[in-house]
Image: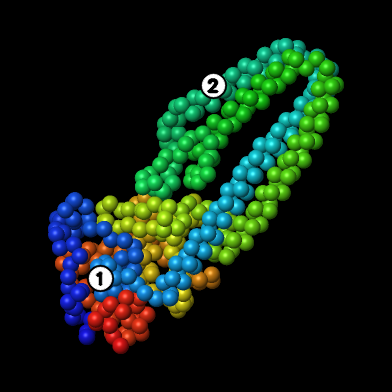
């Protein structure tokens, strides 16, 4: 049978009640564009009849499907471990930085308490000055938390992908797990103000009540040594986790510094939706590379000489979903075959137009039917997971 002949099963629309709007898009009774998943695009590009069988309830049957699910689960678990190690490194280094700052302050205090009386300073006035400074830092910190100063000076708000089905602004105080902005947008100013206020207030109190300066210097010296040992242990933990993160990242063709903002496990990951076209889907991962959100599509099984068009369209669909979800256009999408075969697919006007045409073709088939086999290749039919239910398969 030739590719331009419709089959009986392929000619049946899956959404016969859809209507075509003035914009050329087919819409359901709810007024929204007919839903087209990235997987629909992949199946339809591979073979419209295979897509139609899937859309009408025919499940795929092949060992490759089961193996693919297991390999995708293993990839997700690997990415999750990478995220855990990256988070531990980041948290440990942050703690180490603050603790190192405490060590420097304690060292200065040890020397200052030993010789402050020799400087001829008025201890009471100096203590009051420190208290006034603490109050000033506290007020600035509170103002930075309560007032929308970032918006006033033109800083863009940071967004993480719609992991809960909607955009979420970042809390401008502390850096939570999964934080997608920079420190300037996320709270280093507020944290610095509050920590400075605490440090100055403690010093003010210490100067007033530490009557025995030598004894205070001795205690501070021992405390400095203790903090140094603790900071060393934290740094060692950070280095161990960084080494493991480098190992796992290399297995996934990533850098240890690349941040994973999304990983699909088919259960807890949220569906990304483009309300304008009806496109939806769950990319395997969304990775932050050079401050850009980059979708990654993982393919298991045999490695082709060049990317299949069906896989390429699916990866480009995820680029569109990332653009819609984050409000930032990714420069490219990544298509990965196995551990050593990575393809960079440019996301530009040409790719966008090609994707739009394919979405419209799928929606037309959903509304009007007419899905037809698009090839004359017996080998392609033999590798189709729905050939068992296709009466037009090539033998």
Q: Residue at coordinates 63% horizontally, 27% vertically from top-left?
A: 196
Q: Residue at x 43, y 71 (%)?
A: 66
Q: How many marks?
A: 2
Q: Is residue 56 at least partly visible in the picture?
A: yes
Corner quadrant of residue 99 = top right
Marks 2 and 1 sit apart, C-alpha to C-alpha, by 64 Å
Q: Viewer-proximal residue, 128 or 165?
A: 165
Residue toward you, 371 or 144:
371
Residue bearing the label numbered 2: 139
In the image, 200: left or right of 345?
right
Per the image, the residue denoted by label 1 is 52
Q: Position of residue 206 (x, y in %)?
A: 73, 19
Is 188 left, or right, of 171 in this rendering? right
Q: Give percent across and percent down for residue 58.
A: 29, 70
Q: Position of residue 90 (x, y in %)?
A: 60, 46
Q: Quadrant of residue 112?
A: top right
| Residue closest to the far bottom | 395
């Amino acid at each position: 049978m030739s590719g331009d002949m419709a089959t009986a099963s392929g000619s049946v629309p899956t959404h016969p009640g859809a209507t075509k709007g003035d914009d050329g898009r087919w819409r359901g009774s709810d007024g929204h564009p007919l839903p087209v998943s990235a997987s629909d695009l992949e199946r339809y590009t591979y073979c419209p009849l295979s897509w139609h069988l899937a859309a009408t309830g025919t499940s795929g049957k092949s060992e490759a499907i089961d193996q693919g699910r297991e390999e995708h689960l293993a990839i997700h678990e690997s990415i999750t471990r990478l995220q855990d190690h990256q988070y531990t490194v980041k948290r440990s280094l942050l703690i180490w930085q603050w603790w190192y700052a405490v060590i420097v302050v304690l060292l200065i205090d040890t020397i200052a308490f030993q010789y402050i009386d020799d400087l001829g300073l008025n201890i009471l006035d100096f203590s009051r000055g420190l208290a006034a400074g603490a109050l000033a830092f506290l007020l600035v910190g509170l103002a930075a938390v309560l007032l929308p100063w970032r918006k006033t000076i033109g800083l863009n708000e940071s967004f993480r992908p719609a992991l809960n089905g909607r955009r979420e602004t970042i809390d401008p105080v502390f850096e939570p797990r999964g934080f997608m902005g920079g420190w300037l947008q996320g709270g280093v100013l507020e944290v610095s103000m509050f920590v400075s206020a605490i440090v100055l207030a403690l010093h003010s109190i210490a100067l007033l009540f530490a009557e025995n300066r030598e004894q205070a210097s001795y205690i501070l010296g021992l405390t400095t040594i203790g903090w140094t040992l603790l900071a060393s242990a934290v740094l060692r933990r950070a280095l161990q986790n960084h080494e493991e993160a480098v190992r796992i990242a290399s297995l996934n063709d990533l850098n240890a510094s690349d941040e994973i903002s999304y990983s699909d496990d088919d259960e807890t990951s949220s569906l990304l939706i483009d309300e304008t076209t009806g496109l939806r889907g769950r990319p395997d991962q969304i990775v932050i590379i050079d401050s850009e959100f980059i979708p990654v599509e993982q393919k298991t099984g045999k490695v082709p000489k060049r990317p299949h068009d069906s896989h390429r369209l699916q990866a480009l669909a995820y680029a569109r979903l990332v653009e819609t979800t984050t409000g930032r256009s990714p420069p490219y999408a990544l298509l990965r075959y196995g551990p050593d075969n990575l393809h960079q697919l440019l996301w530009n006007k040409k790719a966008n137009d090609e994707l739009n045409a394919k979405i419209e073709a799928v929606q037309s088939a959903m509304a009007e039917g007419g899905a037809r086999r698009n090839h004359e290749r017996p080998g392609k039919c033999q590798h189709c997971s729905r050939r068992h239910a296709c009466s037009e398969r090539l033998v």
